Image (spheres, helix red, strand yellow):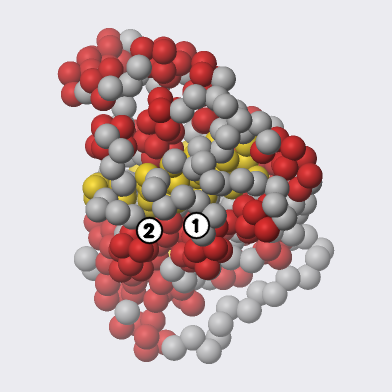
C-alpha cells in the first residue's frame, strides 16, 4: 500500500485532470472508474483539443488514446439528438470499445453514443442513430447508412480517425473520402495512430488543417514488456506451445495465427490437451465473436487464438501474454500484436515461435527492438494432435544462404 501511495503522489505532482481543464463532473466520473491521473498522451493532447486545434497524435498501443479525444468531446457537447461527433475506427471490436468509453463517461451529460458496424441489423442501428449525439463506426457500414439516407452528418463538429495506420492497411481511405463529402468543412479533425509513416503524413496533410503534432515513443519499455523468442521447427510448434501455456494456466493469453484455418486447428489442439481455448476469426458471426470476446475478457476462456481481426480491436486489461504462433509479414503488425499486453504500465510477456521460414521477418524485429528481445530455451512435450488434417509444410525451398546470412548475423546485436 505504501508504494501505491507514493506512486499516486508522483503522478499528481506531474499533472491532474483539473489542470488540463477537465470539469469537476467529468473528473468525478473518471474517478468513479478508478482513472485518477492522465497518461502522457492525455496530458499532451487534451489541452490542444480543448482549444479547438486539429491534432495528429502518435502514441503506443494501450497508452490511453481513446480518452484523449473522448474527454474533450464529452466536455464540449450537449444532448440534442443531432450527430455532432463522428469517430471512424477500422474494426467493429474497436468501434464497440470506443463506444463503451463514451457511454461510460458521457452519461452525466445524457449524451447518447451509438456504434455502427457490419454483421448486425442495419435497421436497429438506424433507429438508434435518430437520437444519437455521437457515432462510432467502421467505414463500410457508415457509408452504407449514408447512401441509404439513414444518417445525417451535416451537424458534425468533431471528426476522429482512430488507428489511422490500420485504416490505411485495410484499404479504407477511399470510403473515408466518400464519408467526408457529407461532413461540414468547418470541423475539428483528430487523427490518432500507434505508428507514423510517410503515408500517414500524407493523410494528415490531406485531412487536417494546421494540426498540432504530438509524437510520443511507440516502443514499450523492456521492464514492462518482456519479449522472447524460441527457435522451433514448424511441425513442433504445438509441442512447445502447450508446455508454455501450462506454465501460465491462470493467465489470459492471446495467440496470433496468420490464417483462419490455423486458428481453428490450434484452438482444437489446445482443448484436446486440456487447455481452455477458443478461436476468433473473420468466419464467425458477430454474435459468436462477441460471446467469445466476453468469455475471454471474463476469464471463462483462458486462451484466445486469433487472426489479426483482434490485433487492434481488443482492449482487455488483464492479458498477460501474447504469443506470435506465426509472424506477420509487416513489422508494424508485430508492434500492434504485442501491444495487447504490457498496457497502462502493467507487466506482460510477448513470445515468438520462430521457424526458419520466418527468419527474414525476425531480422526486422531484431533491428527495431535490438536488446529488448531475447532467445529462450525451448522445452518440448508429447501432445495429442486433432484428427483433422492440417498442412505441415515447412517451406523446404527456403533459401539456406539467406537464413545463414540474415537472422543469424543480426542475432548478435
Q: Which residue is mark 1?
A: 180
Q: Going 44% across and 41% down the picture, which residue do you hit? A: 157
The reply, left or right, for residue 246 in relation to residue 71 is right
Confirm or deny contact between disc 1 and disc 2 (CB under 8 A).
yes
Q: In the rendered view, would you say 110 is above or below 361?
A: above
Foreground residue, 249 or 361?
Answer: 361
The quarter of the image holding the C terminus is: bottom left
The reply, left or right, for residue 244 in relation to residue 207 is right
The residue tagged with tag 2: helix, strand or loop? helix
Q: Going 52% across and 30% down the picture, which residue do you hit? A: 102
Question: Residue 262 in the image: x percent, y percent?
Answer: 67, 64
Foreground residue, 107 or 412?
Answer: 107
Labels 1 and 2: the sequence-earlier one: 1
Q: CA distance from mark 1 to mark 2?
A: 9 Å
Foreground residue, 325 or 69?
Answer: 69
Question: Residue 347 in the image: x percent, y percent?
Answer: 38, 36
Foreground residue, 215 or 317?
Answer: 215
Q: Going 49% across and 24% down the picture, which residue do you hit? A: 78
Q: Going 68% across and 36% down the picture, which residue do you hit? A: 130
Q: Which residue is mark 2?
A: 207
Amino acid at each position: 500500500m505504501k508504494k501505491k501511495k507514493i506512486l499516486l503522489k508522483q503522478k499528481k505532482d506531474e499533472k491532474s485532470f483539473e489542470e488540463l481543464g477537465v470539469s469537476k463532473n467529468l473528473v468525478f466520473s473518471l474517478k468513479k472508474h478508478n482513472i485518477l491521473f492522465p497518461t502522457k498522451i492525455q496530458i499532451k493532447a487534451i489541452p490542444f483539443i480543448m482549444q479547438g486545434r486539429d491534432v495528429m497524435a502518435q502514441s503506443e498501443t494501450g497508452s490511453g488514446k481513446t480518452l484523449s479525444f473522448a474527454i474533450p468531446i464529452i466536455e464540449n457537447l450537449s444532448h440534442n439528438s443531432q450527430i455532432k461527433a463522428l469517430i471512424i475506427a477500422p474494426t467493429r471490436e474497436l468501434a464497440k470499445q470506443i463506444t463503451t468509453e463514451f457511454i461510460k463517461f458521457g452519461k452525466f451529460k445524457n449524451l447518447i453514443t451509438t456504434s455502427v458496424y457490419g454483421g448486425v441489423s442495419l435497421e436497429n442501428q438506424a433507429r438508434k442513430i435518430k437520437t444519437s449525439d455521437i457515432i462510432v463506426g467502421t467505414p463500410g457500414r457508415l457509408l452504407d447508412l449514408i447512401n441509404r439516407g439513414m444518417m445525417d452528418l451535416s451537424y458534425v463538429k468533431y471528426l476522429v480517425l482512430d488507428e489511422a495506420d490500420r485504416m490505411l492497411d485495410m484499404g479504407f481511405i477511399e470510403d473515408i473520402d466518400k464519408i467526408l463529402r457529407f461532413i461540414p468543412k468547418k470541423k475539428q479533425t483528430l487523427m490518432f495512430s500507434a505508428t507514423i509513416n510517410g503515408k500517414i503524413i500524407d493523410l494528415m496533410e490531406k485531412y487536417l488543417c494546421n494540426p498540432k503534432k504530438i509524437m510520443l515513443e511507440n516502443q514499450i519499455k523492456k521492464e514492462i514488456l518482456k519479449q522472447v523468442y524460441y527457435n522451433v521447427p514448424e511441425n513442433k510448434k504445438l509441442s512447445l506451445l502447450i508446455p508454455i501455456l501450462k506454465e501460465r494456466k491462470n493467465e489470459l493469453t492471446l495467440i496470433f495465427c496468420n490464417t483462419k484455418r490455423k486458428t481453428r486447428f490450434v484452438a482444437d489442439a489446445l482443448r484436446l490437451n486440456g487447455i481452455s481455448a477458443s478461436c476468433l476469426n473473420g468466419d464467425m458471426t458477430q454474435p459468436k465473436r462477441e460471446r467469445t470476446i466476453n468469455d475471454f475478457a471474463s476469464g471463462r476462456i483462458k486462451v484466445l487464438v486469433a487472426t489479426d481481426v483482434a490485433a487492434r480491436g481488443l482492449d482487455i486489461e488483464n492479458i498477460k501474454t501474447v504469443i506470435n504462433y506465426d509472424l506477420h509479414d509487416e513489422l508494424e503488425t508485430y508492434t500492434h500484436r504485442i501491444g495487447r499486453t504490457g498496457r497502462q504500465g502493467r507487466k506482460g510477456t510477448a513470445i515468438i515461435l520462430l521457424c526458419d521460414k520466418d527468419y527474414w521477418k525476425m531480422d526486422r524485429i531484431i533491428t527495431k527492438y535490438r536488446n529488448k528481445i531475447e532467445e529462450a530455451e525451448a522445452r518440448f512435450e508429447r501432445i495429442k494432435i486433432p484428427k483433422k488434417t492440417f498442412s505441415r509444410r515447412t517451406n523446404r525451398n527456403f533459401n539456406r544462404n539467406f537464413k545463414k546470412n540474415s537472422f543469424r548475423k543480426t542475432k548478435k546485436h
